[in-house]
Amino acid sequence: MRILLLSIGALALTGCAGSTPFVKSADPCDAPVAIPSGWLSDQRVELLWTRDRKALLDCADKVEALSGRKPGPH
């Protein structure tokens, strides 16, 4: 009985590991902007924020298009 439970557990983990890469590749959005360590000037913070905000808006358009809705105004 113990071997059966271990076998079922191993099969379940294998099944989950196989489906994870598919979920990651189906994501239409870019990853958030990586914030470098150390001191950042106001200009650098604004540039990173702008880049991240633009990616978020593009992502919303992609998700809405994939769902069949029309992208909203920005």
Image (cartoon, grey):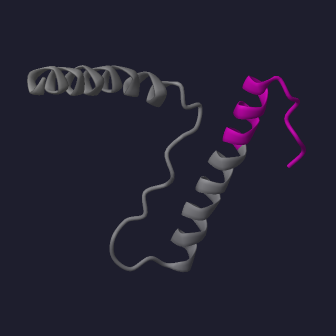
Direction from residue 42 to residue 63 in the image, left or right: right
The image shows residue 45 at horizontal and vertical percentages of 54, 71
Quadrant showing the N terminus: top left
Direction from residue 57 to residue 17 in the image, left or right: left
Q: Residue at x 60, y 54 (%)?
A: 51
Residue 55 position (above or below residue 15): below
The image shows residue 28 at horizontal and vertical percentages of 59, 31
Stretch in magenta: 58-74
Residue closest to the far front: 1
Residue 30 position (above or below residue 5): below
Q: Residue at x 39, y 28 (%)?
A: 20
Q: Quadrant of residue 29?
A: top right
The image shows residue 2 at horizontal and vertical percentages of 10, 27
Q: Residue at x 15, y 27 (%)?
A: 6
Residue 34 position (above or below residue 13): below
The image shows residue 64 at horizontal and vertical percentages of 78, 32
Query: Between 1 and 11, which is closer to the camera in this rendering?
Result: 1
Q: Is residue 72 magenta?
A: yes
Query: Between 30 and 16, which is closer to the camera in this rendering?
Result: 16
Q: Residue at x 90, y 45 (%)?
A: 73
Residue closest to the far left: 3
Direction from residue 24 to residue 58 in the image, left or right: right
Q: Is residue 62 magenta?
A: yes
